[in-house]
Image: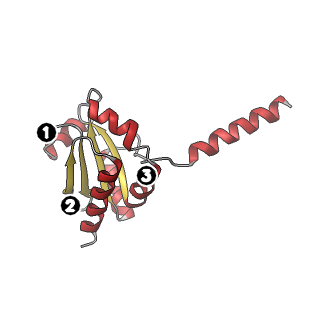
Amino acid sequence: MKKVAIVCILLLSISSLSIAQGIVFERNKSWNEIVQKAKAENKLIFMDAYTVWCGPCKALQARVFPDKELGEYFNSNFVNAKIDMERGEGPTLASKFRVRAYPTLFFIDPNTQKIVTQALGFRQIEDLMQIGKQAAAKKSI
C-alpha cells in the first residue's frame, strides 16, 4: 500500500511539473544553441539580460515571468533565454547588444542577431505582453 501511495505522489509531482506556468526559459544552452533553436522554430529570441544582484530583475522573475497568460504567449511565439550578464557568455552578449542597465529585455531576430525591439527596466505583465506582441508583429513584416 505504501508503494502505491509513493508512486501516486511521484506521478502527481511529475505531471504538475510538466504543465508550464509562466515563461519557460531555455536552460543550460549556449547562445549558439538558442539561436539555432529559434531559427529552426522560426521564432524571435526573447532574452532577459539580468544580473543576480539586480532588484528589478528579481521582481520580474517573481511577479511577472510566472504569469500563465504571459507564459502561454511567450512560449508560443519566442525562444526564451534568461542570461546572467556577468557569467559565462553573458559579458560577451552584454557587449554585443550594448547592455547599459538591468534588466534589459531584448527581442532578437535569430537570422541576423539584430535587435527587433528592447525594453529597459521592470515591466508589469500587461506592458511586457504588449511589447512582446509588438515585437512579434515586427517579425512578420
Question: For the residue labelled by badge 1, is the local secondary structure a helix, a strand or a loop?
Answer: loop
Mark 3, Cα crowd under 10 Å, few <14 / some 14-19 / many 20+, is many
Which mark is first along the chain, 2 or 3?
3
Viewer-proximal residue among 87 and 33: 87
Which amino acid does the dot numbered 1 rest on?
Arg
Residue that mark 2 sits on? 112
Determine whether label 3 and label 2 are within 8 Å by CB: no
Residue 71's label in the rendered image is 3
Write down the quadrant of residue 120 in the picture. Answer: top left
Q: What residue is at 75 percent from the left and 36 percent from the top?
A: 7
Question: Residue 93: where, in percent of width, then height?
Answer: 20, 42
Q: What residue is at 24 percent from the left and 50 percent from the top?
A: 106
Quadrant, the N terminus: top right
Horizontal arrangement in the rendering, residue 81 relative to residue 76 (left or right): left
Comparing labels 2 and 1, the label whose residue is closer to the camera: 1
Question: Residue 139: where, in percent of width, then height?
Answer: 26, 67
Q: CA distance from mark 2 to mark 1?
A: 21 Å
Write down the quadrant of residue 64 in the picture. Answer: top left
Asked if residue 43 is positioned above or below residue 59 in the image, the reply reads below
Write down the quadrant of residue 90 in the picture. Answer: top left
Viewer-proximal residue among 34 and 134: 134
Which amino acid does the dot numbered 3 rest on?
Gly
Which amino acid does the dot numbered 2 rest on?
Thr
